[in-house]
Amino acid sequence: MTRSPSPHCPRTPTSDRIVTSCGTRFAGSGHRTDGSTAMDRFRRLSLGLLFVCFVNADAQQTNQRDMPGPANTGNGCPISPRVADYPARGPSVSNAWYANADRTIWATFWGWDFVRRGPDEPEPKTRYEPGQKVLWYKPTDYALKVTGKRIDGAAPPLVYDIARDPRPRGPIQPSRVYFPAPGCWEIDAKAGSSELRIVVLVKNPAP
């Protein structure tokens, strides 16, 4: 049965449809195919796109938070972060190891706070040598080469010394590392095709 159109909506019959100024409906049914249906679809599509954009933005922020990066200090030295791990068969010193991305070279300063203490000259009588003990883990078949330079000013190069224990014990290489001056230092350690590069901030004792 065809419904009578509203007196405010003049109709124009077209085949099995009744067209009025208020919209279009099919004869014999109460279903109206006006702009409200299209508007509902548009709203649902907009909400879906908004949800997808929100999820993608949240995922990008999560990935950026999870990516390790340098910890910039107040003076602009990009200090390298330590890793929450330690080498296989190595001492499990908590938060004390630096490592490269593929975990083939490791280094620990044994909790040193990077404050220079003691004389800068060796004392033969006491066998004192300036510097800090650093333990390295590296690929077994290659010798370790370590260099370092100050990147925020002039200074002599870093001293890497293995004279007291020149032969590595498998992957382990003990050493002494001496920073001739305070400042921001970049250390580069290589063994075969592996490389570890870290940045540390060395300070003088507080006056």
Image (spheres, rainbow, N blue to C red):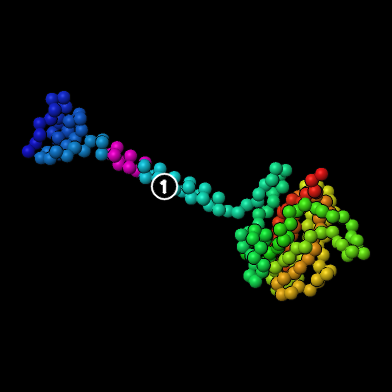
Magenta stretch: residue 103 in it? no
Query: Mark 1 = which residue?
Result: 52
* Residue 102, quarter of picture: bottom right
Residue that protrudes farthest toward the top in the picture: 8
Q: Quadrant of the C terminus?
A: top right
Residue 134, placed above or below residue 43: below
- Amino acid beneath label 1: Val
Q: Which residues are magenta?
A: 38-46
Q: Residues within 10 Å of mark 1 (few under 14, many from 20)?
A: few
**Residue 5 drawn at (x, y percent):** 12, 30
Q: Relative to 204, does residue 191 appear above or below in the rendering?
A: below
Percent coordinates x, y for residue 16 in the rendering: 13, 39
Q: Main secondary structure of the magenta part?
A: helix
Q: Report x, y in % for residue 40.
A: 29, 39
Which residue occupies the foreground of this view, 106 or 96? 96
Q: Position of residue 183 (x, y in %)?
A: 78, 49
Disc 1, SS: helix
Closer-to-camera residue (203/1): 203
Quarter occupied by residue 195:
bottom right
Q: Residue at x 80, y 63 (%)?
A: 176
* Quadrant holding the N terminus: top left
Q: Residue at x 65, y 71 (%)?
A: 89
